[in-house]
Amino acid sequence: MRLPIFLFKDLSSKLVLRWAVALLGFSFALGAEKPNVIVIMADDLGYGDISAYGTKSFQTPNIDKLAKGGQRFTNGYCSASTCTPTRYSFLTGTYAFRKPNTGIAPPNSPALIQPGTETLPSVMQKAGYRTAVIGKWHLGLGGPEGPDWNGELKPGPREIGFDYNFLLPTTNDRVPQVFVENSRVLNLDPKDPLWVGNKKPSDDHPTGLTHRDSLKMDWTHGHNSTIHNGISRIGFYTGGHAARFRDEDLADEWVNQSVKWIEANKDEPFFLFFSSHDLHVPRIPHERFQGATDLGYRADSIVQLDWCVGELMKTLDRLKIADNTLVVFCSDNGPVMDDGYADEALERVGKHRAAGPYTGGKYSVYEGGTRTPFITHWKGRIQPGVSRQLVSTIDFAGSLAALTGVELDDDACLDSIDVMDALLGKPGAKGRDHLVQQDNGKGGNYGLRVGKWKLQRHDSKSARNLVVETHLANTKVPEYQLFDLSKDPAEKNDLYAKEAKVAKRLTKQLAGLIDKGRSR
């Protein structure tokens, strides 16, 4: 942009610079776009778990329609192979391994994202959006002492950029089984207060150990504390009976609340984080989806998730806002079969391969842990196609800030890169040139993807969940491994010794990315 010469006459250089910056910023803001944005994040969904990515075991027509009408990414990633760290990095734009205690959050975890942190929803608020999160949270609530379940649950989503929230506060294999709307437990009777703890509240408190015969779904490891709805969970709780929900109704509730919120906010730009729980244990789909496949409740839950996507898209069409809405479909980590409950996911898997051609799954830094379905759809704007560009859920903050004309502060969203052109499928657009992957964080295991190369660093000297189709186990591995994904997508042939120059370069690069504290 050229500035008129007369502006410079008799003005100090400092003032001219201020005017120039202001005018350039105004010009950039004029070029900004503000479509509605919906991010649909599946839970524990693997690369091979939907028909758009190759499974023939069952069909996911609504997700397939998204893929057919938009960009289907073959190198789309979450940043971690478990839920809490991926969700942390998705919202903050910063790798979770940079912050302590961002592993799988316990039931009474305090808020992991503190007020004052720049987040994806706070970026969208700056751009003039209404913002909401509906579904699974699992990022803690409340101050340092943890949640006050009978009072105000602050800080929470509304203190970090969301105008509205309707939540499953933890994850459904952890107590309590209640909804949180904005800052309070929904339908909580003060005469029946809710208590959540780590120890058995009384000797006669029913658990999955003492009352195993009463369970409608048995546990295989852990998950044997408080019983609710015939299923034992991690952790203990009492009270709050009027507030408790039925597992089978979760998906319907997420859809109903989302449709209601979209209808109320359709006349202004909105950002909705639709946080699914369907595939996560305990997998209890609604009765109308039970038996929808031959593979048991896990696959039935995928069909239920597909229905959720269809209902959201029908809503956009009905309200005539589909052509002004960017929809992103992704997952928080890769798949797992037996994750603590006897739901026949292993016994009935047949030829289905949840991670597709990749090794590993949930808990692992092998490709199956973090490479997942990743689809962008914007009716009339994104041209249909398949993209090989490297993109990640951690990049939504940087990308949507660029799209909507918000400038990120230097100390915000430290690892979120602007890959919006790639997300929109623009010809010649480039995605990331590298990505750091992590497991749950406790073991300090990392992956570094650069081009065709994949470096693994196992500080714990073990890798989890190597063979997701058969068992969940820790397997001893070398501290470093190197793979050529173009020839070895299953990461079977370790080239760390053979490709010494590449190994040395990537080992140094990974250490630098971890130690530097930022990559943006």
Image: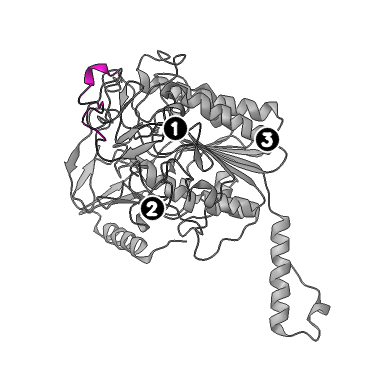
The residue beneath circle 1 is 191
Query: Which mark's residue is nearer the viewer, 2 or 1?
Result: 1
Q: Quadrant of residue 339?
A: top left
- Count of all numbered marks drawn on residues in the image: 3
Residue 264: mark in rendering = 3
The residue beneath circle 2 is 96
Of callouts 2 and 1, the N-terminal one:
2
Query: Which mark's residue is nearer the viewer, 2 or 3?
Result: 3
Q: CA distance from mark 1 to mark 3?
A: 33 Å
Residue 174: mark in rendering = none
Q: Tell me the SS state at disc 1.
A: loop
> Which percent across, then down, holds residue 279?
39, 28
Tell me if mark 1 has few (under 14), some (14-19) or many (20+) residues whose alpha carbon lies within 10 angstroms of its own: few
Start-end of magenta stretch = 201-215
Above or below 255: residue 9: below
Amino acid type shown at disc 3: Ala
Of the pair 180 and 428, the residue shown nearer to us: 180
Residue pictured at 68% horizontal, 53% vertical = 32
Magenta span has 26? Answer: no
Question: Can I make out residue 392 in this image?
Answer: no
